[in-house]
Each structure stands twice: as C-alpha cells, then as structure tokens.
Image (cartoon, grey):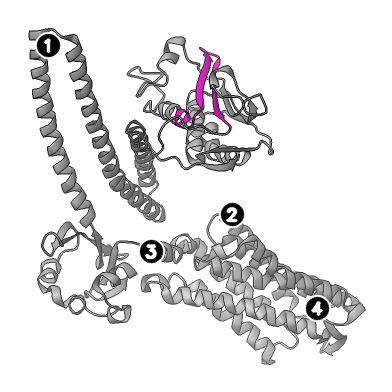
Amino acid sequence: MQSTPYSAPLLITAALCALLTLVIWRRRQAPGAVPLAVLVSAVSLWSLAYMFSLAGTTLAAQLFWVNLALVGIVLVPGSWLAFALIYSGQGGWLTRSRLLLLTIMPLTSLAAAWTNEQHHLFRSGVYLVNSGSFVVLETTFGPLFWIHTAYSYLLLLLGSLLLARSLFRMSPSYRRQASGLIIGLITTWAGNAIYLSGLSPFPHLDLTPFALGISGLALTWDLLRFGLFELVPIAYGTVFQSMDDAVIVLDGRDKVVEINPAALALIRRESREVIGHPVERVFAGQAEMIARYRQVSDVCEELVFGTAPDDRSFELRISPIFDRSAQINGRVIVLRDSTERRRAAMALQRQNEDLAAFASENARLYSAVQQELAERKQTEVSLSLAKEAAEVANRAKSRFLGNMSHELRTPLSAILGYAELLKISARKQGSQDLVNDIEHIQVAGQHLLSLISDVLDITRIEAEKLDLHLEYFDIATLVRDVEVTIMPLVQKNGNTFHVDCPSDSGMMYADSTRMRQVLLNVLDNAAKFTEHGQIRLRAGIEAATARSGTAPLESGQPVVALFQISDTGIGISPEQQRDLFKEFVQIDDSPTRKYGGSGLGLVISYRLCHLMGGTIAVTSTLGQGSTFTIELPLPVRMAGPTH
C-alpha cells in the first residue's frame, strides 16, 4: 500500500455519495429518485475503487481496482439518461426492452476489461509510472474502450440536453428552485473536460467522480428542499400544456409570463407574439373587458361573446399569485369554454318544463281515469290506462335520470380534479389538516360518482339501450385484473382473499368490461359485509347446473363459464334473499346502519348476467356467510336486445 494526496478526497466523496444514496432511497417514490440513487451509488463505488487503485503499489493490484471502478463507471451514463427522461416527463420511453438494450454496451465493456489479457481490445497496454512519491497506472486504450467512451458520452449528452430543455421550458418562478439541475449540468461536463484536456491541476487524477458527486449533492438538495421532482416540470408538461382550459399568467405589471397552447389557439397567436407583452397589446380588440378587470384579482364570472345561435360562452376565473411576503405579484386567468354546458343546461331546462307539463297532463288524465273508473267500475279499463301511464312515466323517469346523471358527472369530475390539485398544493405548504379535509371531499365525491354511474347503468338497462361489446377473452386474465382491483378493499376490513383459477381456464365469449363490473360488484359486496374473514373466488369452465338453462352442445354435456364468490360475512336471511336483486334494497336498512351502498350493485349485476344469457344466484346462512354463483353459457346466447 502507498499513500497519495488523493485518497482522502476520494474517500470523502465515496462516503458522501453513499449517504446521499440512503437519503434518496428513502424518497424513492418521487419521480426520478430511483435512477438518481443508482447514479449516486455508482459514483460512490467508482470513487472508492479508484481510491484503492491509487493506493496499490503493483500493476496487478491497481488494474484489479480499476476494473472494479469500471462497474460504477458503466452505470453512470444509463442512470443519468433514465433520470433525465423521467424528470422531463418522458419516462414512458423506458420500456423493459429498451432498458435491456441499454445494458448491452456496459456488460460488453465490463467483459472486455476483465478478459483484456486474452485479446487486448480494451487496453492495448498498461504500465506503472512514477508521479512524485507514488506510482500510478498508465493505460494505452484499445478500440473497445473508445467505442464505450463514445457510447457513454452520447448518453450523457442526451440526458444533459433533456435536462437543459426542461430548464428552458420552466416558468421563471421555478428556475431558481432548479439550481441543482444547473449545477449538475455544469459540474459534470466541466470536470470531465478538465480531465480530458490535461488542464487538471492534479496530475494523473480523474476529476469526473468528484464532479458527479457534486452533481448528485446538488440534485439531492433540490429533491429535499424544494420537492423538485414532485410537480415541476412533470406537471408542467402533463397538466399545464395539455389543459383544455385556456390559462394565462400575468406578472405584477400585467405582462404575459406564461400561456398554454389552449389559450394560444383561442386568441390565434404565436407564443413569441404574447410572452413578455402587456395584456392590453395581446387583447387589443377587447379594450372594454381589459378595463373592467384591470384591478380585479379574484373573480369568477361567465362571459358570452357573439349572438345566438353562434354565440360562445366562457367561464372566466381570475386568481391572485402571492409571493413569500403574501403580496400579490401576479394573476392567473383561466377561460373555460362553457358553451356546450350552457346549451345543455338550457336544453335540460326545456326538458324539465316539458316534463312538468307532461306531469300536469298526466295528473289530469289520471283524474279523468279515476272519475271514469268510479262511474263505470270497469277494472279492465283501469288497468290498461294505469299501465300506459306507468310506462310513459317510467320512460320519462329514465330519460330524466339519464340526463341528470350525465349533467352531474361533468361538474363532479371537475370538482375531483380541482380537489387533487388543492391537495398537492396543501401538501407542499405542509397543511396536513387541510390535506385530510380535501381527502374527505375526494372520498365523498368518488362515492357520489359511483352512485351516479350505477343510476346511469340501471337507467340504460331499463330503457334497453345498454350496448354489449362481445369478444373472446381469457378467463384467467380477467380474474387477475379483478384480483388486483379489489385487493385494497378486501384488506381494508382485515380479510384474506383466495383465488382458485388455473392459468389454462380457457376462453369465454361475452362483454369483458361488463363481466368485470359484475365480479367487482359482488366482491365489493362480500368485502363490505365481511370483517377479519375469508373471501374466495373460484372461476373456470364447468358443467352447467340445472338452473342455468343451457342447451346441450353437440358433444352432449352443456358447459358454462362459472364464477363462484364465497365469504364468511354476516350472511343473508331468507327474507332478505327474496328482495336481494331489487332496486335500492339493502341488507342493513336501519337508520343507524354501518354498511354503505346504494342497493344498485347487485341489481345491475343481475340484469347484466341475464342480458348476457346467464344467471346469478345466492345461497347464504345468517351469521356464517354467503355464496354467489354466476354462470354464463358457452357460447353465449343473448337474452335480450343489445342494440
């Protein structure tokens, strides 16, 4: 062993990078954190092995540690590129096959370095030279080394360009927070350039691991201090740039500092004609509107442009932007095209008026019928008129519920979307109480959205307008998808879930989406009424039971696709079983009932099974559990119109 002045700095770099790896790994859920952890750990290995190489006094010892350092060296370019892709919002490019391709050159370089004595393609010559009071390894590189170097520089260059582009696209208010990226880009290339150019003040010392260590430290600072990978610029590319709403950001002097593509399309201008210009110049044709809202920092109104029937309406929302001193230093202007919503609301209003008129007319007809029944006492006429009135009222009810469901889902989806953005903002501000309140809003909203979807489904079924999309699909694949979806709900009440479905269970011909909906409804019911128990799903192709009504196939014995769901829950009494598949009927209907639900899930499942030519039945013992059996014939014979 020999002592060198470079050992201590390399050891410090290795230890610091190892510590940073642990810190980053604890935040590995943040986008880009995992490849950054791999990058920093590779630099740690590189620095440590490089230190031991300089400490060696023989050619064999230094060559061994140099080859070991190469393990960290080959990991750096790929992890740098992966980090840059994820950070810039292009992580979808990193498919499994592409990741495997990225490992070919590193593995080839490692194999060539460790077997260099047999071919001398990686190093054509190695020898020791004196450098003052110690000896260092000098290398004459072979063709494979230069191929590896070109490959590594290409990946590093691509990653740097991606990061540089992300910095350029950032809002000015975020560029200060991205200081770690700027330091990382400059330090990495500067350190390597100094070493390769021979201008290093430290002879025979590769400055690249030191530069990468500083880059990792800077990026980690951004991750810990600013939460850089949580929202920007990923949210900038996926939210701001892709929003359907027109968004314009003004600074304190009413100059445009940001504008998204939807706003540019609305005003029919290019970004270079808008960014940095006063809002009066951008909207020169709307002087009256500019004067009206010049001093307004918080407003929500509806604007109508043009005349009917070609008029367009927009929901205008102006929100203030506060600086760290709670002073207003800008405004965000959002324009949402509400033309279709307003027209739909007007159509709904006209429809409600028609429905009211129909109800009034129906009441008049009913009164006339009652009078006629009293006079003639003809039961047959009474039943006929009552049936006709009920059918008309039922159609009106279905039409009304269908329209209301559509109208409710659109604003409810917007509420859930804004709630998610509010939760992100509250979490960044450290307001955990506000985060919890927003999560309660989201849970209630999701429950209401599910109820609206159930009402819409039952309305379509009753109106015979539910479309079935029949296709062949694998039973085992369907069961695996259902298992992944239902598992969190099963575990919520401390239950265990067992699935009995061989991978070769076979194919069935039905509507896969509706079949998944049936299974999830029944499993949701089982999980809701079972606590610290067992839920079992058995699926496959089996012989039909007597109740399935399946005609024998040409081979003789009829077969069906069978799904059997069993639980050890509270069970269902015989009286409750008789009403189980009726609308809005719940097992626990007491005023203080502990189980939620609308009573529509099993009804929808029952109707869907019959539409697909199958059956659903239940057997249960109160206090011991229930078993639901679903059978669909092969091939499926439709039980009703599918439109």
| Left or right placement of residue 520 versus residue 582 in this view | right
Say what amino acid the circle numbered 4 marks: Leu
What's the CA distance linking mark 2 and mark 1?
79 Å
Snapshot quadrant of residue 375: top left
Q: Residues within 10 Å of mark 3 (few under 14, many from 20)?
A: few
The residues tagged by marks 1 and 3 sit, at their Cα atoms, a distance apart of: 64 Å
Q: In the shown orientation, is residue 323 left or right of residue 573?
A: left
Could you say which is closer to the camera, residue 353 or residue 19?
A: 353
Between marks 4 and 3 in the image, the one whose residue lies nearer the viewer: 3
Whether 368 is drawn above or below 353: the answer is above
Residues packed near mark 4 inside 10 Å, few (<14), some (14 to 19) or many (20 plus): many
- Mark before the other along the chain sequence, 1 or 3: 3
Disc 2 residue type (three-letter): Arg
The earlier-in-sequence mark between 4 and 3 is 4
- Residue denoted by label 2: 26
Tell me the kind of residue under disc 3: Ser
In space, the residues marked 4 and 1 are separated at their CA atoms by 110 Å
Quadrant location of the N terminus in the rendered image = bottom right
Q: Quick one: SS at disc 1?
A: helix
- Amino acid type indicated by mark 1: Leu
Look at the image and say whether residue 536 sits in the magenta stretch.
Answer: no
Q: Please state the horizontal and vertical placement of residue 469, each as a whole percent of the image.
A: 47, 43
Residue depicted at x 26% and y 71%: 250
- Looking at this view, is 141 or 378 the one in front? 378
Q: CA distance from mark 2 to mark 3?
A: 31 Å
Q: From the viewer's perspective, is 175 left or right of 332?
A: right
Q: Which labelled disc corresponds to residue 373?
A: 1
Q: Which residues are magenta?
A: 608-634
Tell me, for residue 54, which label it has, or none. Answer: 4
Instruction: First in sequence, mark 4 or 1: give its number.
Output: 4
**Front: mark 2 or 1:** 1
